[in-house]
Amino acid sequence: MTDIAMIEAAAGRLDGYARRTPLLSSPFLDDIAGRPVHVKAECLQHTGSFKFRGGWNAVSALRPAGVLAYSSGNHAQGVALAAQRHGIPAVIVMPADAPAIKIANTRALGAEVVTYDRASTDRDALGAEIAAQRGLTLIKPFDMAEVIAGQGTVGLEIAAQAAEAGITGPAEVLVPCGGGGLTSGIALALEARAPGMRVRPVEPEGFDDVARSLAAGERLRNERLSGSICDAIITPVTGDLTWPLLKRLCGPGLVVREDEALRAMALAHDRLKIVLEPGGAVALAAALFRPGEGPVIAVASGGNVDRAMMARALSA
Amino acid sequence: MTDIAMIEAAAGRLDGYARRTPLLSSPFLDDIAGRPVHVKAECLQHTGSFKFRGGWNAVSALRPAGVLAYSSGNHAQGVALAAQRHGIPAVIVMPADAPAIKIANTRALGAEVVTYDRASTDRDALGAEIAAQRGLTLIKPFDMAEVIAGQGTVGLEIAAQAAEAGITGPAEVLVPCGGGGLTSGIALALEARAPGMRVRPVEPEGFDDVARSLAAGERLRNERLSGSICDAIITPVTGDLTWPLLKRLCGPGLVVREDEALRAMALAHDRLKIVLEPGGAVALAAALFRPGEGPVIAVASGGNVDRAMMARALSA
């Protein structure tokens, strides 16, 4: 079970290898929100998302001979780079119809990409077979103590940077939420280091299993798993490790529309000079377009957006 | 005359008010350049460019009752925010045909904008009259010791961050160059703190007065002053303070085409998740598309680009 000591240990392992990403702000965004807005620009992390933190911590803590991950996106790149920089092999299992650029990027980071046919292949069985044959350790995208601890280092930085920015007293911390690894890690860190802060998961409309789960007090699933531009944060359900943490520490959840995520991307471009993907922009969208009191800190969790999607956000 | 002691003093004044912008990198950019590329992301500075540093230092050092600046761009916003945060009035003199968004942005930062007709009005006479009437101090865009010292704090940070990144020995530092305030300030700082580094100004094709001046050993002028997408770094000629520093410490100059600046913007979007304006991207373009040996540090000096221009870069 992840705790603050594990997050502190992760911070030690990440020191000098992960970036301490900046906490950005703009008076123009404050005006839109009607309150002070601070943005934790995790899109500036290595590989363009917070996922590098969890990947690095898992590899560094477990010292596996090699790693395997299932992912077509940010987790794949985070694990691939972490493995490459530790000098161990990484196998990433991706659907054969994943975008060519994502496959190419993951290979360029030194990973071996194994593709499978979504319709005919059992991904888990294929992965288990490869892992057993080659002696690889599976790095899960969120439901794994070392991964949650790595993502939790974002929370340690938020606590320190908020104090540096003069934020004292209550504040809301909004976090894009898929399986809950980042959200629960941040919540654990802030429980210990900035207990006045309230962590609220943010999801896209139609994929709001966490908001509904927190409201119901029991773990619910998403009905759909595709059809969102916020693909980076779409997961079927929270994890066995993340759900109890989310339930104990977070909420209520917030939900934003896709057009709001696109507007947040355009405003981040104009006012902060950072590039966000739709899923990485939902917390900023909630900070800008939902009412609230006092300072708000929005985690901008990733920036791996293709040029066409960014052009769409800028022309909206 | 600006010296390292003035830059150190500027760093003290800026501490806690300007951002220490990150030094970013990506293995994908290293592959393109064929050598390690590091990017000093000054687009993440307050107001979206390094100009805030010089503006802040001048206001903080001179303690004027109020300030006046001529600018339709980054210098205007930098001076306006510096004045606002010092609680003093700022008047910005802008051409009446400046883009409405730039006038609105400058006003939103608390400045009074006085517009003039380019064809019929002597800008300098108008500015001198307003300054005399209201007791305002002119903050020049580059040829002013306190402004150069403020921009030079970028060089202090580069020296420290390069050491943290393990860059030892010779390296090239490429800087987008207009009037030479940023370039000469960085060169002064590195002369004292990292003397193995060579500072090279970068300009757009057709507006390469600094490259030609350095080659000729005498100060030359640009023939044209408009018609470049790199408008932020187009100036008639270097200054009486900046030129001797450029001549003593910098060169040879580098020149890039507009299509290369646009490609650098797109690659900064894809790989670093930062937003650059064309003039702010010329040093990165030179780092990526001009041959060279050893590590190279490119200053990304500004990100104040409108959405249409970014969409153009992304579709190129």
Image (spheres, coloured by chain):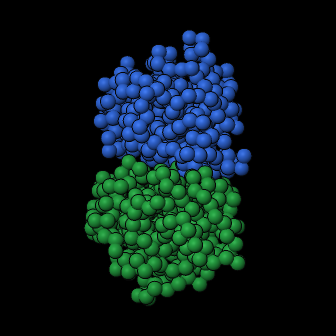
Chain colours: A blue, B green
Q: Position of residue B267 (x, y in %)?
A: 55, 57
Residue depicted at 51% across the width and 52% down the height = B84
**Residue at 70 percent of width and 47 percent of height:** A312
Above-or-below relation of B129 to A133:
below
Closer to us: B161 or A72:
B161
Identify the residue at image location x=39%, y=52%.
B20
Residue B222 at least partly seen: yes
Q: Is residue B55 above or below residue A108?
A: below
Q: Classify residue B92 by image quadrant.
A: bottom right
In front of the other: B74 or A103: B74
**Left or right: B248 in relation to A30:** left
Q: Quadrant of residue B277?
A: bottom right
The N terminus of chain A, quarter of image = top left
Is residue A72 visible in the rendered image? The answer is no
Position of residue B290 in the picture relative to residue A283 (left or right): left
Residue B97, how many percent across, how many down?
70, 67
Residue lying at the far right of the rendered structure: A316
A268 vs A145: above or below = below
Relative to residue A193, is residue A123 drawn left or right?
Answer: right
Identified at 58% across, 79% down, the residue is B206
Q: Position of residue B305 (x, y in %)?
A: 61, 58
Label tally: 0
Residue furthest to the top: A217
Q: Is residue A160 left or right of residue B42?
A: left
Q: From the viewer's side, name the closer residue of B77 and A236.
A: B77
Q: Where residue B152 sits: x, y (%)?
A: 37, 64
